[in-house]
Image: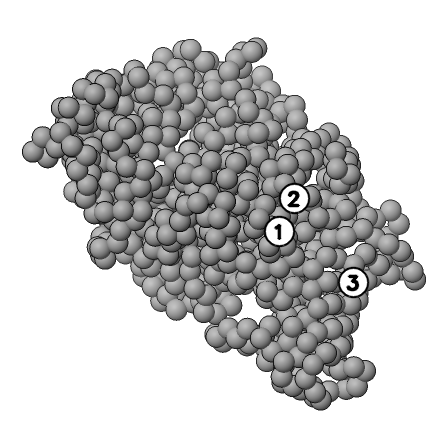
């Protein structure tokens, strides 16, 4: 794999005239990319990928060129340095890779149709038009688009269309922007539009396979998000419109193309009358995330991919800031605490994890940077720490200065810290660099040593880890007034514990609010004091206590056997986040059992004991006026009672199924997955399987599709498992974008795991060919490692993946996931008997 050389150093574009002709019938792209720029040398390179180059002209004259497919460039020799206009005539295939320019497929009234869309991040603009395809190479763009147009089709791009001549659509000149943010699309689309208070046109576009009202939710969130950001950033939205487009085939979740944001359908369109609150929160945060990027990422862009975190971490934080402002009753920061935070803690505890800021050595490594738990979740947690330290007024003042200094240009992390430091008078860079440049995070031990309250930090690992003596500047957020704001030292002594306890009048706690990225290990004196005053803890406190204990148990610094007796103390909480944390711990106890064993039966009994009161309180029917917490807790506790094989729950789910058998899509979306899973597992048949699969193919409701997927993959029947696997490579049934979900769910099913594992090993080359260019391809490996827990599976995992260690973009994932399984196997081996004994005692 070729090393990256920065093409921008030799040739700096200022403007592109692009003519692109897309032929859907012949699956061919052709066109001319005319680039005006400053040539620093006579030998320049321009990116291309998979193209046939017909000619290269400089200032109207043919010039020598060669193509280098390995390096993804055209080598061009110019007659002179300085200002040059280079026109490149080219053609390329229209592929189904979901990268570059590509078709999305869907059905409408039984007819197969397609729309064309784009995905250029990270380095796929070069598949669409020759360009200097680097974030720093910002330029303005004039796009002219031609295609085999049918009457009534809609054409969209970053900027408004200004005219159509001879079947060619011409769009207004863009502002100065990076190539990876260019986007366009066309096809038979419906839309709903509105206008913000400042005059920005906002629209939501989708295929006509969706009901018109499925666009309403997204339109409302998009409009209000833009209005919120204009106020929060104190910087106007810089384009005339903001289109949100749902693509039927989309490899990622969404993409922040400037003015034309693209989404997976599941994250944009939804049934406003029957979608769970959790799904509405998810869709709202995805939209708010992409629109946060319109400033942070698009207006000001990272200089190079090593600062990818700068875009993604910030947008990940701002999605919660925005949605919390738009819908305060949702308490959306609780979603951050139950999704992003544990994801970051789990991933970042494995030795060998990448730091948030990481160097990039070759093009394939760029996609491997998109480690969501680090670049998005951990990075967001870093910025949440900064926000807590600075406060919103200073944060906004710093951002306003940052946008003013770098708009339509590029920046680095140091530029952001400088702007925030200037606004706050704090050395933000010194604090943040200890978090961004180092992998991992600390465990802070709080203990009474010789009567003194003593704090110490060291790196926390799950599994084997090499202690490199790392130290962090930790925002402690302690509840004793004597606790320093930042802990820079390896160890600090706060003073005489008895005196401190008396003067503060409450148990000592750290990381109050759970905003800082570390776990706390309290000694027995401090922990017993906290538990004795448990009634004084709020929901975040309880979540944090359970979460930190779980992490310490995974890291072998505490035994799960010690946590098991405490679980009943949290079982009657009415807080969704406490129940989420509780059943995450309970879920981890499953790894100590094998299917159909007495130990598993005892664990099922414990689940029944934990969930019984909540199931009786909440039942299977939503109640008028009930709280959001009750809505979101219901599926958690009902799921627990199903695992417990509660006969009443199984019967209730079956009754609901039978009452709605001819209208399954109308079942309450929050409970529907559990009802369908129960029906397939307890009452399954080939007829039921075929019914679910047919419904899956026909529906355009992404939420209903997911329920059906979970139902189908819950089968106990080996023949039906085989039928499921047979559809994995049938794109007419399972889109490649959805395949990872099918594989993972079947892998989780004890009756499907072997078949799923056999499939991925047998069909790896097909999988690599089909979705190997996808930035999320490596997560097939992650998902496998999430499930495996026995020495036999570890050996099989290593035998299959270790020969692939040198595959660019997969190396770190394979190394990390091998360690994840190794640490899990070692934990089970060491603790299994003790944990199962504790479960048996607690289940009585």
- The label on residue 404 is 1
Occupied quadrant, residue 714: top left
Element at label 1:
helix
Characterize the local packing of mark 3: few (<14), some (14-19) or many (20 or more) Cα atoms within 10 angstroms: some
- In this view of the protein, can residue 603 be seen by the observer? no
Looking at this view, name the residue that lies furthest to the right: 166
Q: Is residue 726 above or below residue 42?
A: above
Judged by depth in the image, the label closer to the viewer, 3 or 1, is 1
Q: Disc 3 and disc 1: Cα gap in Å?
A: 25 Å
Occupied quadrant, residue 539: top left
Q: Is the Cβ of the residue at disc 2 closer than 8 Å to that at disc 1?
A: yes
Residue at 23 percent across and 57 percent down: it is 468
Q: Is residue 325 above or below residue 209?
A: above
Of the residues under marks 2 and 1, which one precedes in the sequence? 2
Q: Nearer the viewer, residue 576 or 704?
A: 576
Judged by depth in the image, the label closer to the viewer, 2 or 3, is 2
Residue 405, position as x, y percentages in the image? 60, 54
- The label on residue 235 is 2
Residue at 92 percent across and 62 percent down: it is 166
Residue receiving disc 3: 142
Q: Disc 2 and disc 3: Cα gap in Å?
A: 25 Å
- Quarter holding the C terminus? top left
Element at label 2:
loop
Residue at 67 percent across and 59 percent down: it is 177
Residue 463, position as x, y percentages in the image? 24, 49
Q: Nearer the viewer, residue 792 or 277?
A: 277
- The label on residue 653 is none
Q: Is the Cβ of the residue at disc 2 closer than 8 Å to that at disc 3?
A: no
In this image, 216 relative to 535: left or right? right
């Amino acid at each position: 794999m070729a090393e990256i050389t920065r093409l921008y150093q030799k040739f700096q574009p200022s403007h592109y005239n692009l003519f692109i002709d897309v032929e859907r019938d012949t699956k061919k792209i052709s066109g001319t990319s005319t680039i005006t720029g400053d040539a620093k040398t006579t030998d320049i390179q321009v990116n291309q990928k998979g193209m046939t180059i017909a000619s290269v002209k400089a200032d109207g004259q043919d010039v020598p060129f060669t193509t280098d497919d390995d390096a993804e460039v055209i080598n061009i020799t110019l007659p002179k340095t300085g200002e040059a206009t280079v026109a490149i005539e080219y053609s390329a295939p229209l592929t189904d890779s979901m990268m570059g320019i590509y078709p999305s497929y869907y059905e409408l009234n039984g007819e197969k149709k397609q729309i064309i869309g784009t995905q250029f991040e990270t380095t796929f603009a070069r598949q669409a038009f020759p360009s200097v395809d680097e974030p720093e190479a910002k330029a303005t763009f004039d796009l002219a688009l031609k295609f085999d147009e049918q009457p009534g089709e809609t054409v969209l791009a970053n900027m408004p269309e200004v005219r159509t001549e001879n079947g060619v659509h011409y769009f207004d000149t863009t502002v100065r922007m990076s190539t990876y943010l260019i986007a366009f699309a066309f096809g038979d689309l419906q839309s709903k539009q509105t206008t913000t208070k400042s005059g920005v046109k906002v629209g939501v576009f989708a295929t006509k396979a969706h009901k018109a009202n499925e666009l309403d939710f997204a339109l409302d969130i998009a409009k209000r998000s833009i209005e919120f950001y204009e106020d929060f950033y104190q910087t106007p939205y810089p384009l005339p419109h903001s289109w949100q487009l749902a693509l039927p085939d989309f490899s990622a979740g969404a993409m922040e193309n400037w003015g034309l944001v693209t989404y997976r359908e599941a994250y944009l369109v939804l049934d406003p009358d029957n979608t769970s609150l959790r799904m509405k929160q998810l869709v709202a945060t995805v939209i708010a995330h992409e629109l946060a990027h319109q400033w942070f990422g698009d207006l000001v862009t990272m200089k190079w991919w090593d600062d990818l975190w700068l875009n993604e971490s910030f947008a990940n934080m701002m999605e919660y800031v925005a949605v919390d402002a738009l819908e305060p009753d949702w308490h959306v920061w609780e979603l951050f605490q139950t999704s992003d935070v544990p994801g970051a803690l789990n991933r970042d505890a494995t030795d060998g994890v990448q730091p948030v800021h990481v160097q990039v050595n070759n093009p394939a490594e760029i996609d491997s940077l998109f480690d969501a738990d680090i670049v998005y979740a951990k990075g967001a947690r870093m910025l949440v720490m900064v926000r807590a330290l600075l406060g919103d007024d200073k944060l906004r003042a710093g951002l306003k200065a940052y946008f003013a200094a770098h708009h339509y240009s590029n920046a680095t992390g140091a530029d952001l810290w400088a702007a925030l430091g200037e606004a706050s008078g704090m050395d933000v860079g010194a604090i943040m660099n200890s978090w961004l440049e180092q992998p991992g995070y600390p465990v802070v031990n709080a203990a009474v040593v010789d009567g003194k309250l003593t704090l110490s930090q060291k790196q926390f690992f799950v599994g084997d880890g090499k202690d490199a003596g790392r130290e962090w500047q930790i925002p402690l957020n302690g509840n004793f007034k004597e606790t320093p704001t930042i802990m820079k030292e390896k160890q600090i002594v706060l003073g005489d514990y008895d005196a401190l306890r008396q003067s503060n009048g409450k148990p000592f706690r750290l990381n109050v609010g759970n905003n800082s990225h570390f776990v706390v290990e309290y000694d027995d004196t401090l922990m017993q004091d906290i538990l004795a005053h448990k009634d004084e803890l709020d929901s975040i406190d309880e979540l944090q206590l359970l979460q930190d204990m779980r992490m310490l148990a995974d890291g072998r610094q505490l035994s799960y056997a010690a946590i098991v007796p405490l679980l009943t103390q949290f079982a009657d909480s009415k807080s969704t986040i406490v129940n989420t944390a509780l059943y995450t711990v309970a879920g981890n106890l499953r790894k100590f059992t094998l299917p159909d064993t007495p130990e598993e039966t005892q664990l099922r009994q414990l689940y029944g004991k934990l969930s019984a009161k909540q199931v009786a309180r909440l039942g299977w029917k939503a109640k008028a006026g009930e709280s959001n917490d009750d809505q979101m807790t219901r599926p958690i506790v009902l799921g627990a009672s199903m695992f417990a094989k509660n006969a009443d729950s199984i019967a209730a789910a079956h009754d609901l199924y039978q009452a709605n058998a001819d209208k399954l899509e109308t079942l309450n979306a929050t409970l529907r997955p559990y009802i369908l899973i129960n029906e397939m597992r307890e009452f399954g048949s080939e007829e039921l399987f075929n019914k679910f699969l047919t419904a899956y193919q026909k529906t355009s409701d992404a939420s209903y599709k997911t329920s059906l997927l979970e139902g189908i993959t819950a089968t106990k029947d080996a023949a039906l498992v085989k039928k499921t696997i047979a559809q994995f490579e049938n794109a007419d049934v399972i889109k490649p974008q959805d395949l990872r979900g099918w594989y993972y769910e079947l892998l989780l099913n004890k009756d499907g795991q072997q078949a799923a594992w056999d499939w991925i090993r047998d069909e790896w080359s097909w999988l690599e060919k089909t979705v190997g260019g996808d930035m999320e391809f490596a997560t097939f490996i992650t998902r496998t490692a999430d499930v495996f827990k026995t020495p036999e599976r570890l050996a099989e995992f290593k035998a299959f993946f270790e020969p692939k260690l040198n595959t660019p973009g997969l190396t770190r994932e394979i190394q990390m996931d091998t360690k994840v399984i190794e640490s899990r196997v070692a934990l089970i081996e060491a603790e299994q008997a003790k944990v199962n004994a504790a479960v048996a005692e607690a289940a009585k």
